[in-house]
Image: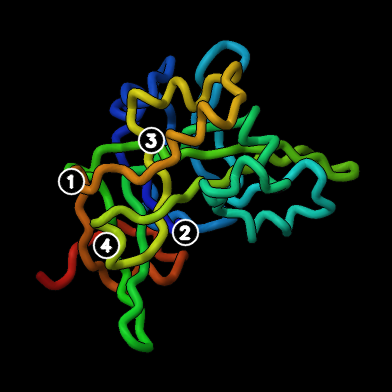
Amino acid sequence: MCGRFTQASDAEIIAKVFELPGKPILSSRYNIAPTEYVAAVRIGGSGRELVNLHWGLIPSWATSTSVGSSMINARAETVAEKPAFRTAFRARRCLIVADGFYEWQKLGQAKQPYFISFGDHRPFAFAGLWERWHGDGDDAVESCTIVTTTANDLVAPIHDRMPVILNPEDHKFWIDPDVKEPQRLLPLLRPIDPKMMDAYAVSPLVNNPANDLPGCRVRVGK
């Protein structure tokens, strides 16, 4: 799964990587947790746009926003068929802006947090889906989920799942609203090449989502 991630890259670099029309206004985030708002890129009326989405997808048919807390991730293996995600998979895909994520390795009764990123901490895109929910008399809520896949060789010793990190050359295809066929999209939902990535242990500071601090991703030990 993916339950915490970071987005602390320079806004100009993000604008270049995600081919945005202008420099976005973004705060550095070091411990993004479910139900918080996250930056995502999607196709709008005039092209690519950066929006803030509630992390935890709320299907259009849900009776309450509370369902979103259990839908922070969508498994690549079932995303095309599961009722909560299948419509968004065909019509509402997005690029969730990140530059690293955390995972916890079980060590007996304890859990050791790890930070996982590209070696140079470059920004990248999680494969995301988004949805718009209208409650009775409430303002619309736009929400998202992160697609996950089997872990690559780097992440597997830590956890058996990882978020889908899209190759930059696949960004355009993933968010193309004219592409709707699952058989064309599913091949993109594969583990990223582990040779490009780095993983190292970090302190328990990250365990508390209130700690949105650079220290969350500082290496500990060797």
Marks 1 and 2, how far apart in space? Answer: 21 Å
Say above or below: 46 vs 210.
Answer: above
Q: What residue is shown with label 1?
A: 195
**Local secondary structure at mark 1:** helix
Q: Earlier in the sequence, mark 2 or mark 4?
A: 2
Q: Are marks 3 and 4 in contact (CB under 8 Å)?
A: no
Q: Residue furthest right?
A: 136
Q: Nearer the viewer, mark 3 or mark 4?
A: 3
In space, the residues marked 2 and 3 are separated at their CA atoms by 16 Å
Mark linked to residue 215: 4
From this view, report whether residue 14 is shown above or below residue 74: above
Tell me the quarter of the picture where residue 164 sits: top left
Q: Amino acid at mark 1?
A: Lys
Residue 126 rendering spot, x and y as whole percentages: 43, 41
**Mark nearer the viewer, 2 or 4:** 2
Q: What residue is pinned by disc 3?
A: 166
Q: Closest to the observer: 8 or 74?
A: 74
Residue at the image position 65 percent from the left and 35 percent from the top: 88
Q: Amino acid at mark 3?
A: Leu
Closer to the chain start, of discs 1 and 2, is: 2
Q: CA distance from mark 1 to mark 3?
A: 15 Å
Say whether marks 1 and 3 touch (CB < 8 Å).
no
Question: Would residue 22 be seen by someone viewing this image from the given angle?
Answer: yes
Vertical relation: 127 (above or below) 168: below
* Dot 4 alpha-carbon crowd within 10 angstroms: few under 14, some 14 to 19, many 20 or more: some
From the viewer's side, name the closer residue of 206 and 163. 163
Quote the CA–CA distance across marks 4 and 1: 25 Å
Q: Is residue 13 left or right of residue 56?
A: left
The residue where tag 2 is placed is: 1
- Dot 1 alpha-carbon crowd within 10 angstroms: few under 14, some 14 to 19, many 20 or more: few
